[in-house]
Image (tube, grey):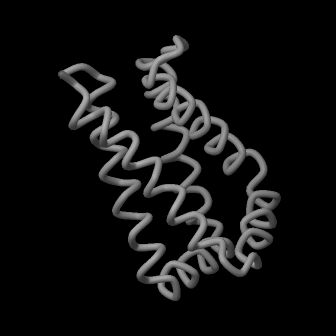
Amino acid sequence: MSLSIFIAKLLSLVYVVIGVGFLFNKNHYRKLLEELSESIVGMFLGGMMALIIGFLIATYHNVWEMRWEVIITLLGWGSLVKGLMLLLAPQDMMKIMKIFLKIKHILTVGGIFVIVLGCVLGYFGFVAQV
């Protein structure tokens, strides 16, 4: 199994499950995100995880060809930048998170977005690998 297929399968599972959680457990996830936006430890650990995952993907899957695999590369670089921002400017990231949480339907829109992204990655990871 290629690295692209493995990462697509993994991210597909994570994104679809989180997206469905956002849609069907909005109160739980809103509370989780509100508490996280106040948590210095949560921001630090989230930043470390994002930095590590982003670094691994950007290092081992740095594909910049106009194929579906570029989605994974973009997600990896995005995660790397997010990790850097969470670790270097945590107060600013907390403010941004609080602003997003004020948007009424953010969990619905976010849930739909990550489900669609997860389905796209799932298609390439599970179905189109012939």
Q: What residue is at 51 percent from the left and 66 percent from the top?
A: 111
Corner quadrant of residue 127: top left
Q: What residue is at 52 percent from the left and 88 percent from the top?
A: 27
Q: Quadrant of the C terminus?
A: top left
Image x and y of residue 41, in percent: 58, 65
Tell me: residue 64, above or below residue 43: above
Task: Say how many tags the image has.
Answer: 0
Q: Quadrant of the N terminus?
A: top left
Q: Is residue 123 left or right of residue 31?
A: left
Corner quadrant of residue 83: top right
Q: Is residue 29 left or right of residue 44?
A: left
Corner quadrant of residue 80: top right
The answer to which of 1 and 125 lies nearer the viewer is 125
Image x and y of residue 75, in percent: 53, 36
Q: Farthest bottom residue?
A: 27
Q: What residue is at 45 percent from the left and 27 percent from the top?
A: 57
Q: Farthest top residue?
A: 65
The answer to which of 59 and 107 lies nearer the viewer is 107
Image x and y of residue 62, in percent: 49, 16
Tell me: residue 69, above or below residue 6: above
